[in-house]
Image (tube, rainbow, N blue to C red):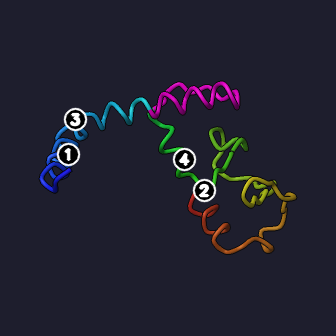
Amino acid sequence: VTPSDIMYGFETITMIVPPLLPALFHIGVLMSSQNLQNDHKVFTTDPSRIPLAAKIHVMCFDKTGTLTKDDLDMIGVVPSTEATLGEIVTSPMTLPMDVVSAMVTCH
């Protein structure tokens, strides 16, 4: 194997891979959708949102009636670390400032 053979191999790869990238990404998203459905019973209606969902660090659920009234009723915050959920915190004074800031900007 000569250095020119190696260069020819690299050139061939750089010409073949770019047109295939969108197809490979699409296949990867479809495979992750299947894994979510089979392993975790999570059904996706728009698989293209899976990569975006992987970037989420904080998720807030709001079922307090903000669609029918103008104010926010906070019951509590459940902190999480890695894959575990902590106990509910009902006093905003004991929450970290970045969590309070996030809650204020949400409403």
Residue wearing tag 1: 9
Estimate the x, y position of residue 50 in percent, counting from the top left.
51, 38
**Residue 69 locus on image (x, y percent):** 66, 44
User: Which residue appears at 12% of the width and 53% of the height?
Assistant: 4
Determine the CA span between mark 1 and mark 3.
17 Å
Left or right of 79 in this view: 5: left
The answer to the question of whether label 4 and label 2 lie on touching residues, with beta carbons closer than 8 A, is no
Three-letter amino acid code at disc 3? Pro
Disc nearest the viewer among 4 and 1: 1
- Element on which disc 3 rests: helix
Disc 2: which residue: 57
Q: Mark 2 packing: few (<14 Cα in 10 Å), some, or many (20+)?
A: few
Q: Are marks 3 and 2 in contact (CB under 8 Å)?
A: no
Mark 4 burial class by Cα count in 10 Å: few <14, some 14-19, many 20+: few
Cα distance between the residues tagged 3 and 2:
32 Å
Q: Which residue is mark 4?
A: 54
Q: On residue 19, which mark appears?
A: 3
Q: Nearer the viewer, mark 4 or mark 3?
A: 3
Question: Where does the image place residue 32, in percent across and percent down from the top left?
Answer: 54, 33
Q: Residue at x 56, y 62 (%)?
A: 105
Residue placed most toward the observer, 92 or 24: 24
For this orientation, the residue located farthest to the front is: 1
Q: Are marks 4 and 3 in contact (CB under 8 Å)?
A: no
What type is the residue that disc 1 sits on? Gly
Name which of mark 4 and mark 1 comes first in the sequence: 1
| Spatial separation of the CA atoms under disc 1 and disc 2 | 41 Å
In the rendered structure, the answer to whether residue 24 lies left or right of residue 96 reads left
- Residue type at mark 2: give it: His
- From the viewer's side, name the closer residue of 52 and 72: 52
In x, y percent, where is residue 58?
Answer: 63, 55
Write the start and end of the magenta stretch as one range. Answer: 28-47
